[in-house]
Structures are given as C-alpha cells and as structure tokens.
Image (cartoon, helix red, strand yellow):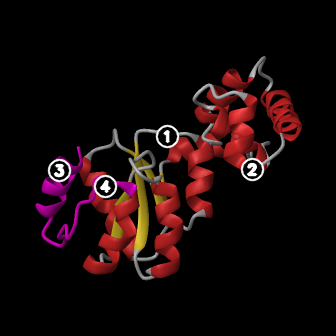
Amino acid sequence: MRGALALLLNLEDDMEVVAQVAAGDRIVAEALEARPDVALLDIELPGRSGLDAAAELRKVLPECQVLILTTFGRPGYLRRAMEAGAAGFLVKDGPVEELADAVRRVLRGERVIDPALAAAALSAGPSPLTPREQDVLNAAADGATVADIAARVFLSESTVRNYLSAAIGKTGTRNRMEAVRHARQNGWL
C-alpha cells in the first residue's frame, strides 16, 4: 500500500515523495534526514505507533505537517492524533485525488479530517480511561497474568487489580480481555 500511494503521489505535478519508511521507530530519523513538508503516517506500525511518532515529529521537526492516513478510522484515534499535533486524519479508503488535495491543504495550514469520522468523534466523547488504566490494559492485551502485568508496569499486583477493575467498569465489559477489545475498538489504546 505504501509503495502504491508513493507512486500515485509522485504522479502529481507539485509533489515528490522523498522517503518511505516501513517501521514506526524509523520515522523520526528518516524525517530529520529527508526534511519532508508533510509526513503521511499510519497508526499501527511495527516498532512504534504512528501516533507516538507524530508527537515526536511535531517536537523535533515542527515545520513538517503530519497527516494520519489509516484503515483504523476510530474516534479515539482521531482524538489522539489531534492531541499529538497531526494536521489531518483520513481513512485509506478514499480516492487518491482526495489524499493529494489533503496534502496541499495541510501545507496551506488547514486541518483536514474525514467528515464521517469527525462526526463520530464528537458523539463518542473522550476516553474514560486514565493514562495508567490504559497502560495496564495495554500490558494485559496478550493475556498476561496480574503478576506479569505488575512487573511490566512497575506496580503492585493489588494496584493492577484495582486499575483493571476500574477499566472494566468504565468500559462496561465483563473482563479484562473484553475491556482491551472495547478500548481498542474505540481507539483508546
């Protein structure tokens, strides 16, 4: 998909793709070398999420506009992308002409957000989870035991149980795996 998008964007008279990166942990280093005007980032990448890379890019290369382009059109992801400093958020199922137009618009200083997703984000509201509850749910995502989770997040087992209970209650689910799934579906993790 990345190669196809690069090929199509390079066909635009006023655009040149200067770099392609397959792993999230290579984005910032490559951007510092290539100095792009716009970075198109996905959310789920090996090594590091595109949202984390976007936040760091905005700090170390503020002149580079970040446009999130993803298959994960979830309200929570949109909210997190905007908090990370992204100038735009689009889902991948749109035509390439709209993507090229979005790149031009963020270069002009506009914010570009998928309209359907913007409406969903407004109705969904913010994540009910605290950052620590998110950490604990992330650590629980692979089915880890409470002891394993406690070791990963440097908390006591009883504190982990409390955070898991709170997250389960806030998500209205029956157990931690359902809470993880629900939080991911809403883009809170």
Label 3: few (<14), some (14–19) or many (≥20) C-alpha neighbours in 10 Å? few
**Cβ atoms under marks 4 and 3 closer than 8 Å:** no
Camera sees residue 86: no
Work out how far the residue at label 4 is from the one at label 2, CA to CA, in angstroms: 42 Å
Q: Which residue is mark 3?
A: 3
Q: Amino acid at mark 2?
A: Phe
* Residue 159 x %, y %: 87, 41
Q: CA distance from mark 4 to mark 1?
A: 15 Å
Residue labelled with disc 4:
99
Earlier sequence position, callout 4 versus callout 2: 4
Q: Which residue is mark 1?
A: 73
Percent x, y of residue 125: 74, 44
Label 2, label 1: how far apart the Cα atoms are: 32 Å
CA–CA distance in space, label 1 to label 3:
21 Å
State the extent of the magenta-drawn residues as a range.
1-24
Which part of the image, by quadrant, shows the C terminus? top right
Question: Which quadrant is home to the N terminus?
Answer: top left
Sequence-earlier tag: 4 or 3: 3
Q: Which residue is mark 2?
A: 154
The residue at the point 11 percent across, 61 percent down is 11
- Within 10 Å of disc 2 (Cα), the crowding (few <14, some 14-19, many 20+) is few
